[in-house]
């Protein structure tokens, strides 16, 4: 039996691909994923994120809440600082607060 592409999956991938030059938080997410794993990786990761947003809207009848770009960038910046601090502590041979607990 031949594998046939799912129409919904194709639609989500096409929508994700269109976000590559978008100036919102989903576009920024796409670009970060592209830097991390390449174009295919970014398309699949963003398509999955779009599918989850769609599912939550349909299944739980929730309205989509747009994330403010500044808030999103600040959250990503804080996460990056945390990862770098954790890595620095590992290189120094120290235990982090989370590991000590």
Image: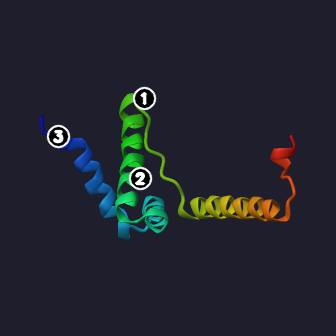
Label 3: which secondary element: loop
Q: Mark 1 — residue? A: 60
Residue mark closest to the camera, 2 vs 3: 3
Residue shown at the point (74%, 62%) measured from the top left: 87
Residue 100 image-quadrant placement: top right
The picture places residue 48, in percent across and down from the top left corner, at 39, 46
Q: Residues within 10 Å of mark 3 (few under 14, many from 20)?
A: few
Of the 4 image quadrants, the one containing the C terminus is top right
Q: Mark 3 — residue? A: 3
Task: Determine whether label 2 and label 3 are within 8 Å by CB.
Answer: no
- Residue farthest toward the left in the current orientation of the protein: 1
The picture places residue 40, in percent across and down from the top left corner, at 34, 60
The picture places residue 69, in percent across and down from the top left corner, at 53, 63
Of the 4 image quadrants, the one containing the N terminus is top left
Q: Mark 2 — residue? A: 45
Mark 2 or 1 closer to N-term?
2
Label 2: which secondary element: helix
- Residue farthest toward the top in the current orientation of the protein: 60
Numbered label attached to residue 50? none
Closer to the camera in the image, 23 or 39: 39
Residue shown at the point (44%, 35%) measured from the top left: 62
Residue mark closest to the camera, 3 vs 1: 3
């Amino acid at each position: 039996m031949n594998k046939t592409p799912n129409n919904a999956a194709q639609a989500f991938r096409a929508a994700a691909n269109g976000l590559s030059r978008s100036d919102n938080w989903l576009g920024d997410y796409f670009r970060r994923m592209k830097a991390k794993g390449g174009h295919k990786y970014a398309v699949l990761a963003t398509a999955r994120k779009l599918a989850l947003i769609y599912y939550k809207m349909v299944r739980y009848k929730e309205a989509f809440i747009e994330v403010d770009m500044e808030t999103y960038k600040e959250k990503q910046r804080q996460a990056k600082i945390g990862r770098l601090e954790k890595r620095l502590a590992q290189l120094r041979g120290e235990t982090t607060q989370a590991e000590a607990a």
